[in-house]
Amino acid sequence: MNHNMTFFGETLLFIGAHPDDIELGCGALISDIKDQTRIICVTLSDNQDNPLHKNLVPEHHASMAILGVMPEYIILHNFTTRRLKEARQEILEVMIDLKNRYHPEVVFVHTARDIHQDHQTVTEEALRAFRGTTLLGFDVLRSSYGFFPDFLVEVSEAGVQTKIRALQAYQTYADKYYFDENIIHATAIRHGALAERPFAEGFDILRIVGQFGEMEF
């Protein structure tokens, strides 16, 4: 039987550009591990410049609550959507502050293959801010052109269903095809098939910092 590689951190930091990014990329994993580690979720833009998105902030908090993220660790900034690159230095400083405050062992950001300009900025600045830290890139389906996961994390079916319920909190995005529960479920099955597991979420490796040690029995 194949065995999973076990990884762990006392603190895991998830950084997304917009409300819904973290849930789309990592929702099942967060749901599965919420009672095993401290989870910090940081979203850089609240997307409030768009009058059609006035409900996004409460929807985001509701979505994160469904995943089980503690309220004090749901952090939402107000950088301007599609203008994150113009605030590159300020975003870098936010990330350095997160590093110094929380000392995460693993940081999850957007995949390096994402074509959205805000997503690219998040990943570029994270690579600068979190030197010496493991970084994994998550997939946001509609903008992750060319993404192929080379780090697969097995998740439970219950975690996948919780992810679907969390995304359903976004009534603002109810008509978006990538919020369709069948697509979310199918993606988890596909990544699971790549890992020869029932379900998985997939990431690309931006940086791995490891240490080999003997197993304790």
Image (spheres, helix red, strand yellow):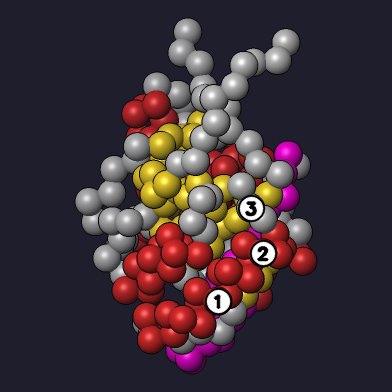
- Res. 132 visible in picture: yes
Asked if residue 185 lies left or right of residue 68, the reply is: left
**Does 142 lie within the magenta span?**
no
Q: Which residue is mark 3?
A: 104
Relative to 56, is 6 above or below? above
Q: Secondary structure at mark 2?
A: helix
- What amino acid type is highlighted by mark number 3? Pro
Tell me the CA gap for discs 3 and 2: 9 Å
For image coordinates 32% across by 56% down, the residue present is 112
Asked if the residue at tag 1 contacts the one at tag 2, i.e. Cβ–Cβ closer than 8 Å, the answer is: no
**Does 40 lie within the magenta span?**
yes
For image coordinates 63% across by 66% down, the residue present is 98
Asked if residue 64 lies left or right of residue 139, the reply is: right
Q: Which of the labelled discs sits on residue 38, or is there none?
A: none
Q: Which residue is mark 2?
A: 100
For image coordinates 59% across by 22% down, the residue present is 213
Report the front residue among 116 and 131: 131
Asked if the residue at tag 2 contacts the one at tag 3, i.e. Cβ–Cβ closer than 8 Å, the answer is: no
Stretch in magenta: 36-57
Q: Which of the labelled discs sits on residue 93, or is there none?
A: 1
For image coordinates 34% across by 40% down, the residue present is 149
Q: Earlier along the polypeptide chain: callout 2 or callout 1?
A: 1
Report the front residue among 132 and 56: 132
